[in-house]
């Protein structure tokens, strides 16, 4: 017989069970019109309507082009008055020359070049004109190989979550600066995070997107966010985020010039265990029945 006290102890106990995993899928494609957007066409399933749609993502190409021209010189003729006005000399190394950094629109038959900044800067090279492309290539390589710190990825909740609940994933990434010497020039490269791709480990991903996500207070865990994900099956999933950085560079203290390209850094994967819950009616607590469900 079950006493009145034992009947009063009836309740529900949630069991965590972990069977096999079935991965959810997504599709990706390439942009057909090259040269307009650096990125991809991603197919994304709306978590509410379950409808699939595609969006073009990526950074728009910089419409400007850049170069430098000799300042205060016309071929082999020097302008002493020009040099006096700026009061500058390039004596930190051999073959120093004053140059203006210039910019103009791409794709224009006769582009109108305009100066960047209010004063020239120095370039150290015997042939500055031929030197430009080499410098541009070296800067791009240095940018892509720089030891950029990966963003810090956070999962809410973690290290466990539930099937069917929204798991919030976000990344914290910051700008960084690198100083180096390239081809005899003092180069400063500044990088900023601009886009993010979230790989949820079950075959689903989101991005590249401009949204890094953000934290939720613990009382709101399970709510949908821009970067949250709902797992359809149980298992252990390696979650990671790739952060894309855009950069600018400055040569010998000159103006900042955009770098044509991006660097990408992937955060270390975090394994997220996805569980499911089941409810069972019980008559006794674990003190009365130590071998009961959930004890």
Image (tube, rainbow, N blue to C red):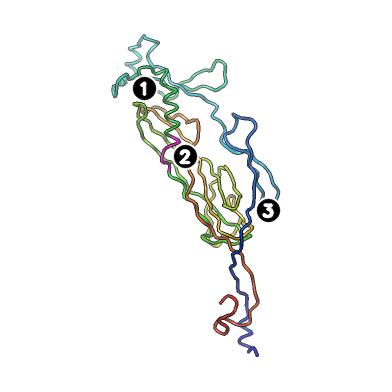
State the residue at coordinates (63%, 79%). Answer: 282
| Residue at the image position 48 percent from the left and 23 percent from the top | 66
In the rendered image of this protein, does residue 267 appear above or below residue 127? below
Vertical side of 64 occupied by 206: above or below? below
- Res 224 → quadrant: bottom right
Magenta residues, as a range?
A: 143-148
Q: Position of residue 161 (x, y in %)?
A: 56, 61
Label 3 to label 1, Cα distance in Å? 57 Å
User: Which part of the image, by quadrant, shows the C terminus?
Assistant: bottom right
- Residue 88 locus on image (x, y percent): 32, 21
40 up-or-down from 273: above or below? above
Residue 68 visible, this orientation: yes
How far apart marks 2 and 1 lie (CA) works out to 26 Å
Earlier residue among tags 2 and 1: 1
| Quarter the N terminus occupies | bottom right
User: Which is more N-terminal, label 3 or label 2?
Assistant: 3
Q: Considering the numbered disc 2 on the image, is that residue within a helix, a strand or a loop?
A: strand
């Amino acid at each position: 017989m079950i006493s009145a006290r034992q009947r009063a102890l009836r309740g529900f106990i949630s069991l965590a069970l972990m069977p096999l995993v079935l991965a959810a899928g997504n599709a990706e494609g390439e942009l057909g019109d090259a040269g307009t957007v650096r990125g991809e066409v991603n197919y994304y399933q709306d978590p509410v309507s379950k409808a699939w749609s595609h969006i073009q993502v990526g950074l728009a190409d910089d419409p400007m082009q850049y170069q430098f021209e000799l300042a205060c010189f016309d071929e082999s003729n020097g302008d002493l008055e020009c040099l006096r006005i700026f009061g500058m000399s390039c004596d930190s190394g051999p073959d120093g020359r004053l140059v203006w950094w210039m910019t103009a629109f791409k794709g224009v038959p006769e582009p109108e070049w305009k100066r960047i900044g209010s004063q020239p800067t120095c370039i150290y090279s015997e042939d500055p004109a031929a030197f430009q492309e080499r410098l541009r290539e070296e800067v791009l390589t240095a940018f892509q190989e720089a030891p950029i710190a990966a963003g810090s990825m956070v999962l809410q909740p973690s290290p466990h979550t539930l099937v069917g609940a929204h798991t919030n994933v976000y990344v914290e990434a910051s700008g960084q600066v690198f100083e180096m010497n390239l081809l005899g020039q003092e180069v400063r490269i500044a990088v900023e995070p601009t886009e993010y791709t979230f790989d949820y480990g079950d075959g689903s991903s989101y991005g590249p997107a401009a949204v890094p996500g953000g934290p939720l207070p613990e009382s709101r865990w399970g709510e949908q966010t821009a970067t949250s994900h709902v797992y359809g099956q149980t298992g252990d999933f390696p979650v990671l985020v790739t952060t894309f950085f855009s950069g600018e560079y400055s040569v010998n203290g000159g103006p900042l010039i955009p770098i044509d390209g991006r660097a990408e850094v992937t955060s270390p994967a975090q394994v997220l265990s996805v569980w499911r819950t089941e409810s069972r009616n019980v008559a006794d607590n674990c003190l009365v029945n130590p071998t009961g469900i959930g004890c």
